Image (cartoon, grey):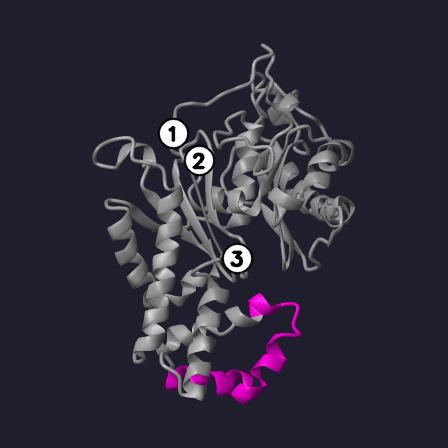
């Protein structure tokens, strides 16, 4: 049984919301309640969604998402029925509370959504309405769901670092992006960038050129074998960025005793701080404390390197963004997708709409008065 909420009315607190994170390692989905924080249940589809000449394959995404969504609903159904029996509703409660199977909103974050998501934006809203009865859908770039997971619906900036690196910021009026252009054109300071710089220093030591690191050459040999064989191992690979990034932890491990490795991480920190400074909104008050402005949240596996990278990054941010607060993300992109779905269900999505970064079909935004809802006052989530 499904029930669709009219687009102008907020969902009842008993309704379900669905968050989805689709990336290079597969698709993850989380089911939650409209009125309660956190997920009720999660599931993982290990196969990544295909991308072809027409962009991200909407049919392949649906083939994975719909069975996963039904599985989550079935797993939650027994618990929901028991909860309803245990917590009898008073006669004056809102009608939306009565349907334990109501899917009020879905938010999907996908890698490549901004540039390769045309089919998703064209096909998913209608397909999800037909299959799940849901009428509120948000389709977001993975950087946006990373932002929502890290910062919520406050102004600020997030740096998502892994194999690549992207910074995204908003003042709740528009999005600002820096980098995320891939390992050939950017991703400066990301894992592939650090790994490549470390391997370059190792090869310089092998050749006897200036700027080489004997410590990194030893790590290259331990990880990849003879230095002369590295080009043959690396260049034919279609996953070169990931291979390069796999050497980044070796750079961090050498940084304490090797000045070349430490210098690479200082350069990486500088690139990351520059990207954050380019997107972080200006403080709304002189002390920088207004409305959460000046917050820079870090998310992604890159920052698990710890102090060898975090310490110089803290210094660079203090230099470029005096008074900014560097924080650790409160949630990952799947958490962010669930937060967006929950806000959409409540009619309280304050993150800026964008035709490719955060797409919500216009008819979903129109209330009973026929006017599009606009939230101009930032509030804490």
Q: Position of residue 67 (x, y in %)?
A: 75, 47
Mark 2 crowdedness (10 Å alpha carbons): few <14, some 14-19, many ≥20 = many
CA gap between label 2 and label 1 equals: 7 Å
Q: Tell me: 88 left or right of 378.
A: right
Q: Is residue 121 magenta?
A: no
CA gap between label 3 and label 2 equals: 30 Å
Residue at x-position 36% and y-position 37%: 281
Label 2 or label 1, whichever comes before in sequence order: 2
Asked if residue 326 is positioned above or below residue 249 in the image, the reply reads above
Q: Position of residue 231 (x, y in %)?
A: 59, 80
CA gap between label 3 and label 1 equals: 37 Å
What secondary structure is marked by label 1? Answer: loop
Secondary structure predominantly adopted by residues drawn in magenta: helix
Q: Position of residue 128 (x, y in %)?
A: 73, 35
Residue at x-position 24% and y-position 52%: 319
Mark 3 crowdedness (10 Å alpha carbons): few <14, some 14-19, many ≥20 = few
Is there a contact, CB below 8 Å, between mark 2 and mark 1?
A: yes
Asked if residue 89 is positioned above or below residue 191 in the image, the reply reads above
Label 3 or label 1, whichever comes before in sequence order: 3
Q: Is residue 232 magenta?
A: yes
Residue receiving disc 2: 153
Nearest-to-viewer mark from 3 and 1: 3
What secondary structure is marked by label 3? Answer: loop
Nearest-to-viewer mark from 3 and 2: 3
Asked if residue 102 is positioned above or below residue 95 in the image, the reply reads below
Pick the quarter of the image with the N terminus.
top right
Residue 328 visible in the current orientation: no
- Between residues 67 and 167, which one lies in front from this camera angle? 167
Range covered by the magenta-colored residues: 213-242
Which dot marks residue 185?
3
Mark 1 crowdedness (10 Å alpha carbons): few <14, some 14-19, many ≥20 = few
Residue receiving disc 1: 379
């Amino acid at each position: 049984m499904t029930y669709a909420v009219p687009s102008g009315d907020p969902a009842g607190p008993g309704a379900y919301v669905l968050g989805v994170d689709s990336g290079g390692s597969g698709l993850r989905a989380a089911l939650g309640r409209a009125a309660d924080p956190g997920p009720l249940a999660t599931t993982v589809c290990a196969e990544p969604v295909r991308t072809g000449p027409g962009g991200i394959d909407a049919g392949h995404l649906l083939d994975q998402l719909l069975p996963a969504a039904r599985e989550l609903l079935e797993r939650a159904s027994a618990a929901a029925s028991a909860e309803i029996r245990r917590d009898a509703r008073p006669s004056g409660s809102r009608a939306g509370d009565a349907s334990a199977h109501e899917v009020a909103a879905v938010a999907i974050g996908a890698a490549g959504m901004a540039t390769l998501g045309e089919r998703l934006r064209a096909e998913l809203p209608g397909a999800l309405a037909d299959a799940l009865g849901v009428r509120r859908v948000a389709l977001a770039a993975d950087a946006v769901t990373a932002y929502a997971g890290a910062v919520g619906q406050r102004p600020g900036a997030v740096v998502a670092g892994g194999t690549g690196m992207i910074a995204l910021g908003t003042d709740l009026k528009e999005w600002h992006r820096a980098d995320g252009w891939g390992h050939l054109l950017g991703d400066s300071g990301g894992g592939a960038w650090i790994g490549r710089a470390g391997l370059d220093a190792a090869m310089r030591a092998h050749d006897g050129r200036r700027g080489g690191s004997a410590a990194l050459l030893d790590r290259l040999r331990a990880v990849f074998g003879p230095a002369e064989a590295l080009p043959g191992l690396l260049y034919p690979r279609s996953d070169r960025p990931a291979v390069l990034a796999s050497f980044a932890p070796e750079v961090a491990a050498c940084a304490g005793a090797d000045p070349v490795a430490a210098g690479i991480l200082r350069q990486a920190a500088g690139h990351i701080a520059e990207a954050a400074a380019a997107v972080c909104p200006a403080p709304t008050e002189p002390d920088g404390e207004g409305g959460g402005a000046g917050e820079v949240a870090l998310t992604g596996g890159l920052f698990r390197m710890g102090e060898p990278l975090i310490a110089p990054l803290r210094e660079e941010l203090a230099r470029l963004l005096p008074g900014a607060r560097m924080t650790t993300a409160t949630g990952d992109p799947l958490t962010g997708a669930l937060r967006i779905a929950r806000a959409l269900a409540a009619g309280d999505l304050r993150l800026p709409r964008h035709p490719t970064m955060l797409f919500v079909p216009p008819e979903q935004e129109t209330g009973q008065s026929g006017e599009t809802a606009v939230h101009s006052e930032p509030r804490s989530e």
